[in-house]
Image: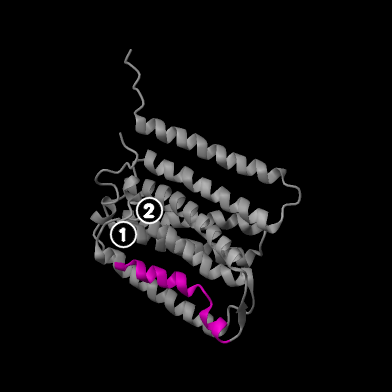
């Protein structure tokens, strides 16, 4: 009988952290369920903490799968790769209704404290969803699909479709039409974040882009009033969206297949012996 392999300090650390983060998720869930008629702020705090600790669980799995290279702050260290974040940020920033606000069709209010808490909530959403869907789901799909551009495309496609489909849960709290639009738009944003990860090798840029997109699009509905989607606002959003989509497709076509392989090469595990 072969001797049982001893766990390394890195493996023990990951397993302990995983248990602690899962316990935190359960604790937050129990706390919220015990609240008697929770207020909107309590519900928002519950949602943010659940996503934050869920994101920590996803981060531990990224390390467990040896995908830790994407957690490095400098990513691929290529200036040309970092330039790609500009179009992605353009989509995120354009999600704020600049034109409608300037024309007086909507107004903006809210205290600094409330806006900062909303920003934290948006960060938690981006943190969880990017680490779970780009850091884990996309990376697992890519691991055996880096040989051809078609295989890389299919990995992006399926991870984005799944990301969009999970928003079906909102069917219980919103109209079917709104949910369908959210599913489609979420899939497109997911594909954009997939491309950001491939171009930069940096999952944190995906988290930042996602959080900024949610903040820009949600801060007026949360703390303002009036009409957001006016004719000019829709036109500018469509122009920016189509321009970035075309640019992303061109970049993807020109991107060498080795770019996907770079996500897995080198010393990947940040918690090492």
Specify whether 228 is left or right of 73: right
Question: Is disc 2 placed on a helix, strand or loop?
Answer: helix
| Residue 113 covered by magenta stretch | no
Viewer-proximal residue, 187 or 227?
Answer: 227
Which residue carries the number 2 mark?
155
Left/right placement of residue 258 relative to residue 216 reads left
Q: Secondary structure at mark 1?
A: helix
Q: Are circles 1 and 2 on residues that touch, CB within 8 Å?
A: no
| Residue toward you, 30 or 146 | 30
Q: Is residue 61 left or right of residue 219?
A: left
Magenta stretch: dominant secondary structure: helix
Relative vertical location of residue 153 with respect to residue 244 in this rendering, above or below: above
Which residue, given by chain and number where applicable, does mark 1 sit on?
200
Residue in the picture at 28% in, 63% down:
81
Residue range highlighted in magenta: 83-103
> Mark 1, residues whose alpha carbon is within 10 Å: few (<14), some, or many (≥20)?
many
Residue nearer the viewer, 271 or 178:
271
Q: Position of residue 211 (x, y in %)?
A: 48, 62
Query: How far, Cα to Cα, is label 1 from label 2?
Result: 17 Å
| Left-right relation of 48 to 253 | right
Residue 97 painted magenta: yes
Q: In front: mark 1 or mark 2?
A: 1
Q: Quadrant of the N terminus?
A: top left
Residue 138 in the image: x percent, y percent? 39, 51
């Amino acid at each position: 009988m072969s001797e049982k392999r001893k766990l390394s300090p890195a493996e023990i650390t990951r397993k302990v952290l995983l248990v602690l983060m899962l316990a935190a998720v359960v604790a937050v869930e129990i706390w919220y369920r015990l609240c008697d008629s929770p207020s909107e702020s309590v519900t928002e705090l519950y949602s943010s903490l659940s996503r934050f600790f869920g994101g920590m669980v996803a981060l531990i799995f990224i390390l467990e799968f040896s995908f830790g290279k994407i957690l490095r702050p400098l990513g691929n260290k290529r200036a040309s790769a970092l330039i790609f974040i500009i179009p992605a940020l353009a989509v995120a920033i354009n999600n704020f209704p600049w034109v409608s606000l300037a024309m007086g069709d909507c107004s903006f209010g809210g205290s600094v404290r409330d806006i900062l808490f909303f920003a934290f909530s948006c960060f938690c959403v981006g943190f969880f969803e990017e680490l779970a869907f780009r850091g884990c789901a996309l990376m697992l799909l890519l691991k055996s699909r880096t040989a051809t551009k078609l295989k890389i495309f299919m990995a992006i496609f399926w991870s984005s479709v799944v990301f969009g489909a999970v928003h079906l849960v909102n069917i219980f709290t919103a109209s079917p039409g709104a949910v369908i639009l959210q599913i489609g738009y979420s899939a497109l944003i997911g594909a954009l974040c997939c491309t950001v990860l491939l171009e930069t090798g940096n999952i944190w840029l995906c988290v930042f882009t996602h959080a900024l997109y949610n903040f820009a699009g949600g801060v007026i509905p949360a703390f303002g009033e009036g009409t957001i989607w006016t004719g000019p606002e829709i036109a500018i959003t469509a122009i920016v969206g189509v321009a970035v989509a075309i640019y992303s497709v061109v970049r993807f076509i020109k991107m060498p297949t080795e770019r996907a392989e770079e996500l897995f090469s080198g010393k990947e595990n940040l918690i090492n012996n």
